[in-house]
Each structure stands twice: as structure tokens, then as C-alpha cells.
């Protein structure tokens, strides 16, 4: 792998939790690792010298870097564990199947037991987890036993055994940790209410437990039993921090293929997650170039068939974001809520990151193509008749009507063309009238371009809503340019885009590159206008102060400022220094003016 290839792949990595995979030139998997921040972690392999010879050899062999994004570092740890056990990469420590993470099991039996286990047995029992640390499941089991009198024995509490008096209550009964179902001191219906509450906590609904603990804590506090109250508070804190479910591994989702799609005007990105034995075992994203404006449904149907064939998938169920045509022997599920929806959303995130990687790579390798793609997206989003290679944005600036100015910034090929920026002093408008000011500057700008036979832009953006847009349109009407140049307004509050004649604004996706370019233009126009306004206001204040001196006019004020650079220096200047600039008579007047002030 060349250094250039490494740099490109590293630059496209996202700064999010995930799992990375290294492949050699023969596409053999070398290593799987987890990261809290994929970009930082993977970059560290290539940015420093390694003492380990084995690590140096690994880095030298890396030809391709792939990754799967997840929501949390804990999810990355779980996914890494699953993938290592499935693929056994050469440079990873071998993980044996019996060295897996623990689950909490609600046993499928009368008077169900609740315990931790590393073995998943298909006997109808419920499994929750897995848990990456013993602290979480240990805390949960402790909470359950504090909260509910559930049994810890492994007796077969069948009706026959209980009726025959086969078992006797144990110490847990006398300690009031169990109500003695083994001797029929407790009925199954009451016991199952405890199990139902525990199931709710494991699924993330622990309001009932929190209410119980809070009441218990308050009772201890009222009885001045502060140590016991603090103990209960610790349990509450632990329970509030607990997250009951993982979006990466879930034993109830088995043998499923998950597909999702992200697309733009030119390409579609279809992500595939393979779920086997309740865990993600494969992630792959396919890039598909559009040719005939195919819909996402059409593309996904083709991709599902191709990807399943490529990876020899035997899954009988597919998760997808919308209805597509699949073969008769496949079950199509469109998840709306819960764990299935979270896995579908995770697939979409991976598709989006693949699209972003493509853009970043394109920007590095072929910046001209990257620019054309962004401009094509703006053209599509704003419904423009042609590619906006030349765009201009206007903004007004005044404070309580003083020193009104306006700014025009120019973007060519999606980038600022600062030599073409223009600033305007408002000449025909009295007072703070943004609408009239916008009409004046738009008229003056394009009147001059027409007179000088300069090229006109394909798109004009005015900072403001319907009012500013209407003012800009009036100016174009006067010049006969309406319909020849596209014009829109952008309002700051919700970043809505207004079009001429449309009652309702357009809301572009906040993450869209189109909106980012428009916002950049608006912000640049605002910055340029504010800077000009401040300069003008400051100059006006200085010149006004000097012109207040009897016998000192505008010409003399300018000479003084050119020489001394500031009013403060003029105040401190000696008579001789002032005389050298403006003569003896005016120097005396300046000194008398400042000496007379308190």
C-alpha cells in the first residue's frame, strides 16, 4: 500500500466509535480492532515508530482499511469480540467460544430464576445482554434481589414436587429474601409479577423500580436511617446509569440480512449487515452509479440480489427501510421500533459514512469533480435551470440607521472569489430600511455589470426572507433581468429558503452540502459587511472629533491621521510635532482645544 493510499484512507475515516479491519493485497484479513475514535486509533498505527517487530510487519502488509461504525465504545468491544471469533485473523489473539461475554437469563420454568450465564440454550428462556463488564450485570442481579423476593435455588418446582413436599424452605426464606414457593407459601401469579417487572427493567423500562427505591429511600431518611438511605441511593444511581440493551448484539435477532441505502444525484450507497446468532458478523457497502435516475427502491432491489449472491447468504429474513420485491422464500420486515429499527438505523449510518468517505476521497484525488458534484447538488436542491458556477450573496448592515452599508460576496466554482467582493455605501435610502437598501444595491451591482458587459451570475442569494427577496426582484425587474438570473432568499431563524412566487419556503437537510455552501456565502457576506460598517463608523467618529476643533477641516483631519495614525497620538503630540504637519496656527488651535477639555 503506497503512502498516498494510506493518507487518503486515513483522511476519510470518521471520528466515531467503531471496529476497523486491516486487509493485505490478497484481501486476506490481517487484524480486527476496536476504537473509541476510529480516525485517531487507526492513524496511530502509521504516525509513529513501533518497537514491536510483529507490529511493524503488520503495518507494512496493510493494503486496505475497512470499518464498521457503532454507537458506543462498548458496542465496539462487543462487535470486535464477535468478528474475531468468526474470522480468527492472523494477528489477533485467538478467542475461544467459551470465553464470551455474560448474559442475564430469565429461565423458562415455573417460578423463573434470574441469573447470569455465558451459555445460550434454546429452551424458550430469555437472554439479555451481553455485558462487557461484570459490574453492570452484577449490579442488576443485586438490584433484582433487593427489590423482588425471587428464588436463587435450582429446584424443579413442578406442582407434583411441591404438593408432595419434596423441598423445604432454606435460609433465604428466613432472611426474607424469598417467600418460599418451594413449600407453596407463594403462588405463581404473584411471583410472575416480579418477573414481569424485572423483564421491564432489562428492556429499559425501570420507572417502577425507581419509584420503589425512591419511596424506600425516603422512608429510611424519615426514620433517620441515613446509612441505609445512602445505600438505596447508590442503587438508584447505578440503575439510572444502566443501559439495558445493546444495538450491536441482540440474541433475539438471528440469521437476518439488514439492508439500507443512502443516495445522491449520481450515486447510491447500499450497506449490508449480516446478523448471525444474534450478532453482526459482516458489514459491506456497495457503491452504485446511477445512469437513468433510478429510484432508491429499484437500486435496493438489485443490490439485495447481488450482495446476497456475492456473500452466499442463506438468511431467510431481510430488514429494509421500505417495501421492495424479494423472492417468495424470503421474509421482508420493515422495522419501525425497538432493536430491529436500531440495527436498520445502524446500517444507514454505515451507508452515510461510506458516502462521506467517497466525497472526501474525491475531494483529495479529484477536486474538480468534487466541486461539480456539489454544484450539481445545489442545482437540484434549488431547482436551478443551469449549474451555479457563479453565485453572489448580498447582506445589509446598519445600527439604528447609522452608516448604512451593504456587501456583495462572490463564489466561483463553489469557492470564495475575494477579489470580486464589493461593498456599497447606501446612497438613496434614509433611515434603517433594509428592503429599500437591498433594492438599491442589487440594482447598482447588476446595472454596472451590464454597463461593463461583465458576466452575470447564475444565482443570487439575499440574506433575509420574503421582504428582502421581493426587493431584490424589483431591482431585477427594473433591469429586465427577471427570469434570466435565479434569485432566492435565506432566512436566519430556521435556515429556510424562499423562492419568488412560492408561499411556503424550502427546508434543506441541515447536513446537506448545498446548505453548507449557502450558509458559507451568507456568513461571508455578513462578515464582510460588518467589517466595512465598523471601519466606516470608526472613521466617521474620528473625523467628527477632529473636525469639531475650530479651524480644522476635513482635509487637515486626514493629514493629521495619515501622519499620527490615531487621535490618541494627536492628543499627546507636542507643538513642534503638530507644526511640522499642519503649521503653527493650526497646531496652536489643536493644543488649545485639547488643553481646554477636562
Image (cartoon, rainbow, N blue to C red):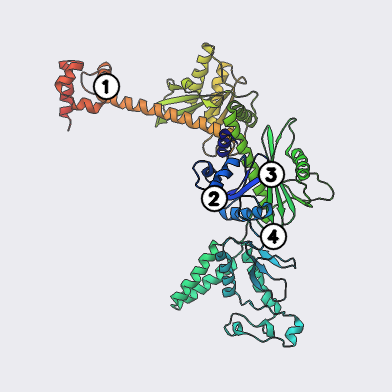
Q: CA distance from mark 2 to mark 1?
A: 58 Å
Residue 251 numbered mark, or none: 4
Residue position marked by numbered label 2 in the rendering: 36
| Mark in the foreground, 3 or 4 | 3
Residue at the location (55% across, 44% down)? 56
Per the rendering, the mark at residue 561 is 1
The residue wearing badge 3 is 284
Q: Which mark lies nearer to you, 3 or 1?
A: 3
Q: Which mark is residue 225?
A: none
Q: Residues within 10 Å of mark 3 (few under 14, many from 20)?
A: some
Disc 3 to disc 2, how far (Cα)?
21 Å
Real-space CA distance between mark 3 and mark 4, rounded to the nearest whole angstrom: 22 Å
Q: What is the x, y in percent for residue 357? A: 61, 38
Residue at left 63%, top 56%? 94
Distance, label 3 to label 1, CA atoms, is: 68 Å
Task: Kindly indicate the quadrant of the structure image that contains residue 298.
Answer: top right
Amino acid at each position: 500500500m503506497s503512502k498516498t493510499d494510506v493518507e487518503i484512507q486515513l483522511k476519510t475515516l470518521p471520528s466515531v466509535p467503531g471496529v476497523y479491519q486491516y486487509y493485505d493485497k490478497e484481501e486476506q484479513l490481517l487484524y480486527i480492532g476496536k476504537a473509541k475514535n476510529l480516525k485517531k486509533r487507526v492513524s496511530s498505527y502509521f504516525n509513529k515508530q513501533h518497537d514491536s517487530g510483529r507490529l511493524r510487519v503488520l503495518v507494512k502488509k496493510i493494503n486496505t482499511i475497512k470499518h464498521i461504525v457503532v454507537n458506543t465504545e462498548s458496542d465496539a468491544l462487543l462487535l470486535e469480540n464477535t468478528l474475531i471469533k468468526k474470522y480468527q485473523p492472523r494477528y489477533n489473539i485467538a478467542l475461544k467460544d467459551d470465553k464470551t461475554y455474560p448474559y442475564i437469563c430469565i429461565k423458562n420454568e415455573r417460578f423463573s430464576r434470574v441469573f447470569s450465564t455465558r451459555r445460550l440454550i434454546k429452551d424458550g428462556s430469555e437472554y439479555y445482554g451481553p455485558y462487557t463488564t461484570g459490574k453492570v450485570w452484577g449490579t442488576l442481579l443485586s438490584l433484582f434481589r433487593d427489590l423482588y423476593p425471587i428464588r436463587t435455588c435450582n429446584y424443579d418446582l413442578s406442582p407434583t414436587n411441591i404438593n408432595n413436599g419434596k423441598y423445604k424452605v432454606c435460609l433465604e426464606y428466613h432472611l426474607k429474601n424469598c417467600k418460599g414457593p418451594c413449600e407453596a407459601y407463594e403462588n405463581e401469579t404473584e411471583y410472575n409479577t416480579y418477573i414481569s417487572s424485572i423483564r421491564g427493567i432489562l428492556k429499559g423500562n425501570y420507572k417502577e423500580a425507581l419509584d420503589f427505591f425512591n419511596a424506600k429511600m425516603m422512608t429510611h431518611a424519615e426514620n433517620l436511617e441515613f446509612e441505609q438511605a445512602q445505600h438505596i441511593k447508590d442503587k438508584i444511581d447505578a440503575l439510572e446509569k444502566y443501559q439495558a440493551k445493546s444495538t450491536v448484539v441482540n440474541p433475539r435477532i438471528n440469521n437476518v440480512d439488514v439492508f439500507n441505502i443512502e443516495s445522491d444525484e449520481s450515486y447510491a450507497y447500499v450497506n449490508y449487515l449480516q446478523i448471525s446468532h444474534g450478532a453482526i458478523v459482516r458489514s459491506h457497502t456497495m457503491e452504485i452509479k446511477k445512469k437513468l435516475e433510478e429510484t432508491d427502491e429499484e437500486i435496493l432491489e438489485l443490490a439485495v440480489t447481488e450482495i446476497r449472491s456475492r456473500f452466499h447468504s442463506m438468511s431467510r429474513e431481510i430488514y429494509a427501510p421500505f417495501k421492495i420485491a424479494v423472492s417468495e422464500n424470503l421474509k421482508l420486515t420493515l422495522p419501525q421500533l425497538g432493536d430491529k429499527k436500531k440495527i436498520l438505523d445502524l446500517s444507514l449510518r454505515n451507508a452515510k459514512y461510506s458516502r462521506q468517505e467517497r466525497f472526501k476521497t474525491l475531494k483529495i484525488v479529484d477536486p474538480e469533480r468534487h466541486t461539480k458534484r456539489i454544484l450539481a447538488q445545489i442545482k437540484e436542491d434549488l431547482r436551478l435551470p443551469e449549474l451555479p458556477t457563479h453565485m453572489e450573496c448580498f447582506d445589509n448592515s446598519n445600527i439604528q440607521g447609522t452608516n448604512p452599508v451593504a456587501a456583495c460576496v462572490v463564489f466561483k466554482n463553489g469557492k470564495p472569489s475575494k477579489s470580486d467582493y464589493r461593498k456599497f455605501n447606501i446612497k438613496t435610502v434614509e433611515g434603517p430600511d433594509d428592503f429599500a437598501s437591498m433594492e438599491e444595491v442589487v440594482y447598482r451591482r447588476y446595472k454596472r455589470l451590464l454597463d461593463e458587459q461583465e458576466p452575470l451570475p447564475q444565482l443570487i442569494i439575499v440574506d433575509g426572507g420574503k421582504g428582502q427577496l421581493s426587493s431584490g426582484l424589483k431591482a431585477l425587474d427594473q433591469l429586465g433581468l427577471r427570469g434570466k438570473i435565479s434569485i432566492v432568499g435565506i432566512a436566519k431563524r430556521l435556515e429556510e429558503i424562499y423562492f419568488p412566487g412560492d408561499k411556503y419556503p424550502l427546508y434543506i437537510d441541515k447536513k446537506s452540502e448545498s446548505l453548507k455552501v449557502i450558509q458559507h456565502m451568507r456568513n461571508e457576506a455578513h462578515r464582510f459587511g460588518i467589517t466595512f460598517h465598523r471601519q466606516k463608523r470608526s472613521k466617521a467618529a474620528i473625523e467628527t472629533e477632529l473636525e469639531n476643533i475650530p479651524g480644522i477641516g476635513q482635509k487637515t483631519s486626514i493629514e493629521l491621521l495619515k501622519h499620527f495614525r490615531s487621535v490618541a497620538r494627536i492628543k499627546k503630540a507636542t507643538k513642534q510635532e503638530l507644526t511640522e504637519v499642519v503649521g503653527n496656527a493650526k497646531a496652536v488651535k489643536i493644543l488649545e482645544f485639547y488643553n481646554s477639555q477636562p
